[in-house]
Structure formats: structure tokens, C-alpha cells
Image (spheres, coloured by chain):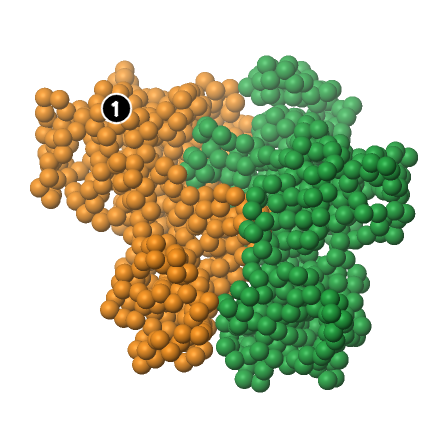
Chain colours: A green, B orange
Amino acid sequence: MNASIETLVIIGGVAGGASAAARARRHSEKTRIVVIERGPDVSFANCGLPYHIGGEIEDRAELAIQTPQSLRALLNLEVLTGTEAVSIDRAAKCVALHSPADGSRSTLAYDKLILAPGAAPLRPPLPGIDLPGVLTLRNLQDMDRIKSAAAAVDRVLIVGAGFIGLEMAEQLHRLGKSVSLVELQRQVLPQLDPEMARPLENALREKGVELLLGDAIEGFEERTHGIAARLKSGAVMETGLVILSIGVRPESGLARDAGLELGPRGHIRVDAWQRTSDPDIYAVGDACETEDPILGKRAAIPLGGPANRQGRSAADHISLGEKALRYPGSIGTAIVRVFEHAAGITGWSEARLKAEGVPYQTVTVNGPSHASYFPGAETITLKLLWSPEDGRVLGAQACGIDGVDKRLDILATVLRARMGIDDLAHLELAYAPPFGNAKDVVNVAGFAAGNLRDGLLSPVPDLAAAAGEQIIDVRPAAVSAKNPVPGARNIPLAELRGRLGEIDAARPVFTICQMGKTSYFAARILSNHGFDARSILGGAHHQMR
Amino acid sequence: MNASIETLVIIGGVAGGASAAARARRHSEKTRIVVIERGPDVSFANCGLPYHIGGEIEDRAELAIQTPQSLRALLNLEVLTGTEAVSIDRAAKCVALHSPADGSRSTLAYDKLILAPGAAPLRPPLPGIDLPGVLTLRNLQDMDRIKSAAAAVDRVLIVGAGFIGLEMAEQLHRLGKSVSLVELQRQVLPQLDPEMARPLENALREKGVELLLGDAIEGFEERTHGIAARLKSGAVMETGLVILSIGVRPESGLARDAGLELGPRGHIRVDAWQRTSDPDIYAVGDACETEDPILGKRAAIPLGGPANRQGRSAADHISLGEKALRYPGSIGTAIVRVFEHAAGITGWSEARLKAEGVPYQTVTVNGPSHASYFPGAETITLKLLWSPEDGRVLGAQACGIDGVDKRLDILATVLRARMGIDDLAHLELAYAPPFGNAKDVVNVAGFAAGNLRDGLLSPVPDLAAAAGEQIIDVRPAAVSAKNPVPGARNIPLAELRGRLGEIDAARPVFTICQMGKTSYFAARILSNHGFDARSILGGAHHQMR
């Protein structure tokens, strides 16, 4: 480490702060490294909290990865828990500290300072928000509080159906609770486009979780045995416990008070080495915003992966200066499991692209998680978004039972590499029957995107877009009879060439099948015979769930 | 399709040939497409054959994906099974055909010709090679033959421990057979570096499969009840059935006789659109060689994924000309499952780089398949190879119980993108406790590679390289006592800073731990205190299996 760095102070001792401390120690044995943590714990596994509440992670000790003592022994860190940083004197380069437990105050000088304060769960100023049964989940104490409160009630109301809300719904259902989930948007997991989140909604409903979508809380009232939540729709939900998971706000008050530059939503602005507007102060994790490497905008991604790697980058820059590897910005890769289902995203969603006015094209395809002839294959639905200008991939979403994480990781790598749809077509992925496919769903998405660009595929995004038109269901007759497509006539693909006379060539024709593949084949046949034919994306599997 | 293409003839109707035919039909309804297939079946799932022999795929019909009748109905193809192409008249643009069943001969004119003849299992001219109990596996008939022969015997000898040999060993063990496996190399799966294949060897031995490594067959003799195989080592193996899986040779005789250019090992040479040296003749699949996109050499990769996508590329070029997407060359991504274990590779192995004299650097790291605090995490070992010149990744290998395919696919994407070790460090992969890690093993490989380049990590590849030197085992005392490292002294990491005086500073010191991570931490502490310290890669997990 740069010999002049005598003292490194890190505010926040969980994901980003802990990573920065560990990396800084690898660079130097001599630097004094002090970690200030407001809570009682450092370096705990915050992403695991819901799973201990639900009992899937049985042993609480699994989540308490390090203690101040273990960090002293392993990394020679000074860890001050139960200590708040109340202000930064940038001119004097010192931090004012306060320990609420004993009321003591002190100051601590730094050569370099890393801010890793994280983000706090939102608690909007609603009537009754401070009732003891209205809880949020951020740390081990919150977890203990929810776990013990949940043990005493039958019904739980979760507000907010993002990643944490869905994990909590799953885990509380696992405990046998009757779970209701309220979400302001008309879908769960609003980070995804609505149709890609639908399988999660179906899975939740099948398990008996009550979904109240497009609704919101107006206030809470105490009842003899629990809480009544009043909704905007007029409904009143009686429940034993409320868990608020409607989002987080960056804990950037200390930075703001110190005059550091903030972004439009209050995140600390940093450069590619995580430096704030003060070159001796860095910020990492949920409290900061970095560049969005996909479209060159700004990104604030409150997730564990970015936080950990940003911490490492900050420590590297403190030690190595401009030789240090730049943090390349966050692309927002995320995944959630809901019972046997998984769904996730990397990069930009269609809703975000639309809202920002960015031009895009999109296809949605289905494919098996591994060779369909090998036992256990499950269907994955993959939605791909790219730039019509150069074919560069802008985002992807996937949902299914198995192998969703793998496809998201491939696409996250594609995004980082700034690859295009043609590159997807020729990714050479690992194929043996238990693991993959000769043409994986990722390849197929690349094929379909290229077909769309080249005019071989003229898809319509959903069945509704074909309503009232001539729709041909090209599935085998038995499949079609069992699960008919509303408004469609059945002409199986194998019979299509012989039955062209039954189709009105003066009107557009829309083809649909089970998975979106043979309807494309059918549309090719029809187009090559002069029809104005379009395939309905994703097939009945995707359209009719 | 180009209006002048009246007849497209495809020789070979399985992976690459079937893909080419299907894609060609999407381009045009008018072209006459004729598929010539020597065998009785077209478009069957050849990668699934071992799994029907073992009964994991119960229904044989799962493998027989299409019939000549279904291809006629769905794609309007003319499929001539049981028909051999005996010669090509390039000047007259026609193929001479022969049907052995009825002895009939004919010729077929083509505008464009695609050769997709595949590769045949090697059968070296050893004594007894033609005994009825010495079988190979290529098609459904071979499969039926092996399945029925296996039912009648207790012991099976498999010759060759590549992908098919290992799959057959697993599946025949599943049937309760006593399995022996002979391999010329001193390791199974010689496509991988030996230490990365070792977990498969251990898994096979644990299940009772006999491994005869570094040995070879000299000949077979008939016995009253079975076959005796004589080995180079002098051993004689009595067995009921022999399965030869020692590799394949490209079926390029027809191309060679027609004067098409071949590569040094007899593969048909093609350009980036799969064109042979005759612009009206294309070749796809196992019989051809393409460019190696990693080092610019040539690659012949007899696998299903490349074959299928090459078929598509050839059909596109026939229809679209130079607007068609180029086939970017094969990188050789492959995976095998052996009982609960998986192992695979993408790109170049260390052995191949060494043999070609290509400079490289390498690290091997371990990491959990998903968050270690969440139930069910298994250790993945990942070996990374890159160019010391610019950090570009040249290859990767992985082994473990779970998530091996995902890491290979990420690295295969990295190879296709020509990304470097620093890109690996900041891949933003999907993280939730059931699916991944805040710092995935792929990120960790990037970190370790960067540390090596930057001089923070001075590893030694194996324990043997530290033999006779000062070795410090930095695992907790209890772990070390239970499973001691030969020749090592235990100083747990947490005690290291206080016990530096016990280490001889005049001699090099080598650190080892369980997974290769804390030994790196220890080496950093020692280096920062002036010791000449090196960490032993991959830890006891990797070194002592």
C-alpha cells in the first residue's frame, strides 16, 4: 500500500465495507484499518436473512460470518461496533464518532475514508407505520424480531413484491403462515416486464398466497389481536404481522452533510475507482451510484455482488492508484426463487427502455433446460432485448423451473462483453444430455433475433394483438383440442401445405403453437406461399399462463 | 432462397445435415431438398445413445426424433435412407447413389451440395477386432446391439476413457455390470489436464469401476464364454463384451475422392461459411475442420452443438450469400457427467498450450456452487488459462458436483468475446443464496489471475513443488489434525501474525489451506513481513484427492 496511508477508516462493516477492509489488508500489513459499524454485527450474510426466518437455513450462526474478534485475528482490523459516524470534517480529515450505548464521543483521523453505509428499508409516513407489528428486514436483529413475531401469528401481510418481498412470501408460507402480498404495480417483481413475472404470480397463487396487485397501503390500525391494514382499493386486511419491503433509500446523509456530490435520487456519486467528489473519500455498495455500462447512464443497484466488488476496487485504488482495475459499472443482474420457480433479469427491461425512449427490438423464446429427450427437462422462457441499430444486447429476462440462473449468467457475460444477437447465435455452450442442448435456448434467442432483423420472422408479441384476426393453431390436433387457443382454428403443421386453400389469403394470418417454434415454421411456409403471416411469440406456453 | 437453387442435396441426415435441411426449407418452399442417409434413421439424438443403453432414457422413441415420413410432412424433404453416396461428379454437379438393399444405382443432380457424413468410431487393425463381441457406438442400431449384448453378460470392458467411454462406464454400472475401463493416457478424459480429471477417476473407483490407465489393448481372443483382451502391460482381461470408444475418424472419403481439399488429419477444409474448396459444395459437422477462433489455428471438434450450428450456417450462405452470418469457429466446449460428478472444458488445455509452445499463465481456484451458508452448496474447482501478453483467456476447465455446466458456459462466452482476466473479475452474475455467490468462483478466478499478474499472488501449482521445503498449513488446528498435509507444520491463520518468529525467514515458505484462499491470505501476510512466501494452489481439496 502507498506508504503514506497510515490510517484507513471504513464506515459500514457488512458487504462492501468488509470486502474493502479485507482487500486493503492484503495490500499492507502496516496500515491501521478501522471499521465503524452502527449495528452490533459485521460481515453478516444479509442475503440469507429470509431463509433463516423460514428455517431453510437452520443455524443462525451460518449467517454471522465474522465477529469483531475474528476480524481482529484474521485481518488485524479494529472494529468498532455500536458506533455511529456523525460527521466528517473533510478539511481536518477526521470523522466524529458517537456510541449511543455509553454516550461517548470521539474523533478519528483518516488518511483515506471509505463510506459503505448501505441503504435503509423505506418506511413511508403512513398512519400506524410505527406500530410494533410493522417490521422491515435489514439486519440480524430485524431477522430475529420477524422470526419471533411470525411464530406467534397465523397471518402475515407483506407489502411490496420485489425480491425481498417474494423471498419472504415463500419462506413464511414454508412456515405454514397464511400470506398476503400487496404490490403497487399490477405485477409482482416490477423489475421484470409483467409477462415474465407471471409464472411467479401463478406459483404464488397455486400455493395459496393471496396477491393484491395494483393496490397500496393507506394506513395501519391496531386491533386486539393484530393489525388492520387499510388499502387504497378500500379493502381492509386483518393480519398478525406486517412486513414492509417496498424498497430502500441510500444512507447518504453523512455524505450529503459533508458536501459530497449526490445523484438525483440521493446516491453518492463516484468515479470508476469509487472515488466521491473528495479524492480522499470513497463510497461503495447500496449508497452509491456508478455508471451504467450498457447505455452510459447512471446506475444504482443495491445488490450484494456489486457492493463486494466495489469494495475491492476502492481498496485497490487506495493502494495502487491509477494502475488499479476500474469498476466497470453495474448492469443489474438479479434472480429470485419462488417455490420451484425462478425468474431474473440482467440489463435493461422493456419497461425501462420504453420509459427512457431508447429504441429496441425484442423476442421471447422457449427452450428446454437440457436435452428434451433426457429426463427432467423443464421449459425456460427467455426474453431478449437489443438495439436495432447495431444488434447489441441491452437486456434479458428468464423464468422457469431449472437452469434460469445459468442463462442469466451467460447473458450477463454477453452484456459485459457488449456482444450482439449474432454472437448469441454462435455461443458454444457445454452440451451433454443432462446439462444442455445442441441448440440452447440462448442460441435460439439469437437465431430468432437475427430472423426478425432479416425479415424471416414477423412476430406479434401477444395473442391479444391478433384478437379478431385469422389465427391458425398449428399444434397437433389432440394437443389443440385439449387446450384450445381462443379464437384459433387448428391446422396441424404437418397438414399445412395441403390445406393452404382453407386460409383466406386476402387477410393477415397469425400462427400459434405450444412453444413458439412450429408457429414460426408455419409462418415461414405461409410467407413463402405469399401470405401475410405472423407468428405469436412464445406460444401457448407463454401466452396462456 | 436464391432463385437459381432448384435442388439442394444433403449427404447425411443426422445433426448437421438435418439442421441444414430444416433451415434451407425456412428460406424457400420451392427448392427441392433431398437428404441421402446411408443408415435407416435420420435426425436421431446421437448424444442420448448411452443413456438408453443404461435405461436412464427409458423410451427408445425419445431418441428417434424424426422419420423420413415426418420430415416429408413437416419440411417437405425427400429423404432417401439406406442409400450411399458413392461419388461426386463436380463437373456435372451430380452425385452417384447406391442402395445396398436392392442393389439399385442412380445419379442425382444438385445445384448445391452439403456434405454431412459425420465421423466413424476408430477400429484399429488389432487381432480379434472383428469378433462379434467387440462393439462401437454411433447409431441406433449400434445402441440396440450393445443393449442386447450387455443384457447377456456380467462384465464389460470399455476401451477409451473419453466422453463416450465415461458415459458408457456410468450407464453400464447403472445396469449392474462389472465395468473395466482401459485408457492409453495415464488419466481419464485426456481432453482435460490430468489433475482436473482426477475427481472423475476417484468417483469411478469408488463405484467399483476398474481403471487401467496408461495401458492399451494388443488384441482380443474368443473364449467359450466371452472374450479375452490382451493388454500392453501383459494383463489379460476376461470379459463378456468390449466397447471401443477410442475416438473417431472423419468420414471424408467421398470428399477426398472428389478432390476437395482436406486438412492434415483428413478433415474437410471449409471457410467461414462452411464452403469447401468447391464453392458449390459445403461440409458441416464432425467431418470438417474450421478455424480455431482462440489462437487462429485449425479446429476439428466432433460435437453436436457445432454440427447443428454449422448446418444452419451453410443453409444461410446458400440462400443469402455473403450477407449470411459467418460460423465463428469451434472452441471445443464439452462436459461429461460421471455419477454425481461433472467435469468439462472450454478452449485450450494446459497440455495443448504446452505442446504447441503457446505461452500461458494459469491459476486453479475453488468456490461453492452457491452461497456456502445456504444448504446444498458443493465445491467447484476451476482452472483458468490466459495469455501473459494481454490477459486474454485461452481456456478453462471445471469439475465438481453442481454448477459445473454454468461456469463452463460463462467461460465459453468469455472465450467467444475474447475477454480477459480483468473482465472475469467484474462479471456481474445472478446472485441469490440458492443460485450463486456475491463473489462467484468465476470472479475469484479473475481476482486470482490479476493477483498473479500484479505480484500479489506467487503460487505453486502443486504440493510436490514444495516437497522438502518449509510448508505451513494455515487451517484451524482441528481440521489440520484430522487430515494432515504431509510435511507441513500447522500455524492457523488467526495465530500467524503472533507466531512469525517460528518461521525460518532465510528459507522460502509455502502456505497451504483447505481451499486455496486462506493460504493466499497467509502468503500476503508473510510477504508483507518480508518472507519469500508462496501459496499452494487449490488447497488440500485440490491437491490431496
Displayed quadrant of residue B17: top left
Instruction: From the top left corner, tell me how far across and down residue B61 is, in percent.
Output: 42, 20
Residue in the image at 21% along x and 45% along y: B213
Q: Is residue A524 above or below residue A392?
A: above
Across and down, in percent, residue B225 comes to: 13, 22
Q: Quadrant of the C terminus of chain A?
A: top right
| Residue on which disc 1 sits | B150
Relative image position of residue A254 (x, y in whole percent): 76, 70
From this viewpoint, is residue A274 visible?
no
Residue B108 percent location from the top left of the image: 37, 27
Query: Which is more toward the observer, B95 or A1?
Result: A1
A222 relative to A196 in the view: left or right: right
The residue at 18%/26% (across/down) is B240
State left or right for residue A64 relative to residue B352: right
- Identity of the residue drawn at 74% across and 76% down: A105
* Amino acid, disc 1: Ala
A461 horizontally vs B510: left or right: right
